[in-house]
Amino acid sequence: MSSSFYVGQREFFPGVGRIPFEGRDSDNPLAYKVYDADKQIGGRSMAEHLRFAVAYWHSFCGAGHDPFGPGTRVYPWDQGATPLARAEAKADAAFEFVTKLGVPYYCFHDVDLAPDADDIGEYRANLGHMVEIAGERQRQTGVKLLWGTANLFSHPRYMNGAATNPDFAVVARAAVQVRAALDATVALGGSNYVFWGGREGYACLLNTDMKREQAHLARFLAAARDYGRSIGFTGTFLIEPKPMEPMHHQYDFDSATVVGFLRAHGLDRDFKLNIEANHATLSGHTFAHDLQVASDAGLLGSIDANRGNPQNGWDTDQFPTDLYDAVGAMLVVLRQGGFGDGGLNFDAKVRRESSDPQDLFIAHIGGMDTFARGLEVAHALVTASPLEQWRSERYASFDSGAGAAFANGQLTLQDLCAHAQQAGEPRQRSGRQEAYENLLNQYLLR
Ligand code: XUL
Ligand code: CO
């Protein structure tokens, strides 16, 4: 395997070269078995379909800390003398990693990329400096920004919320970060801008005016939208639903809640949804369900791919390996004609016990192969299997005659009763769930 290429002063992942595609018979952990970037599937390459992105925070910032102990990984890019020196080295490590992996996009929060500071001038200067460096690395490597965002949940000032904080001073301070993160996203040519409302919710309903807080959230989002458009951001704003954690209840609970919220506040022309697998499951849905709800509303913008742990109830952010989930997700994406400007960001972290630098590559390779296979199977199911025909035949009674008249809003309740009277007891029709499930397995095994 070829090695030794890097973007800055030094190589951070020595011994790992560009990850090759070696196919299914390879046992090399550092090779793709399914993801073949240029392979054509239905007129588009796998790379064009999947639009993978690496998450800066999990891959280069988080070192494995949990509520019971500190990080387990010692990062060579985290050894510099000053916060800015460490941020510069981290950027070099990130672009080396993303380039070696062969992924086209990355995503960041403002304070992943640059050191945070309470002083607004210092915070902005830090971010401005790092945006210049990231821009240079983007030009050098061809890696692009899928989305930027502001971290409005870690700093203690946001403990009662950011845009929904009961104290206006905090709402205004949150705007400083959103403005700077929007500036950064535009400067780096980002396709999307994300809002994940980690602290936008409540811990206790007794002290909370939910209606007022949600109205403030809508005002804040509209102001951010207006600012973004004024500085030339033509991409999509994305809301990332999550029902809870860190708060007891978060306002962007799930897809259905966010779709309703965006429509109620007239934000649905500029905002779409970024659906995260583990957030969907935390809200009691499947990943595919929340994707389908967003897609049916015409508002599925992007995906944060990961998986939870069915035995516990928090956001474990594991790398996706479940082929059924990937097929389910890619069915929704293919049926809506693709991601558009969105993509598939691995909002996932290696386990605390995974302490080798290579584990980060292996985790991404597994996630990419999982979704590549999901794409292949979903594409075969919608183009070559009887799936679409079976599904449309289930609804055939609405395609013509009285069924079509009803669907078009032309029949009254009395008309329906007259129809029932004439037609007699409806014939039983099997839902054939097992046949659908077997069909999926059959194509998965091919
Ligand atoms: C947290 C989460 C975030 C967002 C971006 O659960 O998913 O990383 O994706 O703020
Ligand atoms: Co996420």
Image (cartoon, helix red, strand yellow):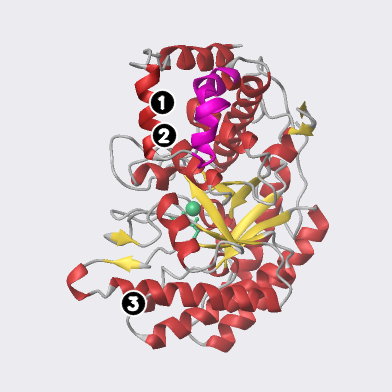
- Position of residue 123 relative to residue 412, above or below, is below
Measured as percent of width and height from the top left, residue 432 is found at 42, 14
Check residue 419 in the rendering and tell me which mark sits there, or answer none: 1
> Is residue 440 among what the camera can see?
yes
- Ligand 2 within 8 Å, label 1 CB: no
Query: In this figure, which residue is indicated by the disc labeled 2?
Result: 415
Residue type at numbered disc 3: Arg
- Identify the residue at image location x=42%, y=40%: 412
Q: Which residue is mark 3?
A: 212
- Which is more N-terminal, label 3 or label 2? 3
Query: Marks 3 and 1: in contact by CB < 8 Å?
Result: no
Q: Residues within 10 Å of mark 1 (few under 14, many from 20)?
A: few
Mark 2 secondary-structure assignment = helix
Of 34 and 186, the residue lying toward us: 186
**Which element is circle 1 on?**
helix
| Labels 2 and 3 touching (C-beta < 8 A) | no
Measured in 3D between alpha carbons, the distance from the residue under mark 2 to the one under mark 3, in whole angstroms, is 45 Å
Q: CA distance from mark 1 to mark 2?
A: 6 Å
Question: Which kind of residue does numbered mark 2 sit on?
Answer: Asp
- Horizontal relation, residue 442 to residue 290: left or right: right
Alpha-carbon neighbours of circle 2 within 10 Å: few (<14), some, or many (≥20)? few
**At label 1, which amino acid type do we have?**
His
Name the residue at the right extreme: 140
Marks 1 and 2 in Cβ contact (< 8 Å): yes
Residue 398 included in the magenta stretch of the image: yes
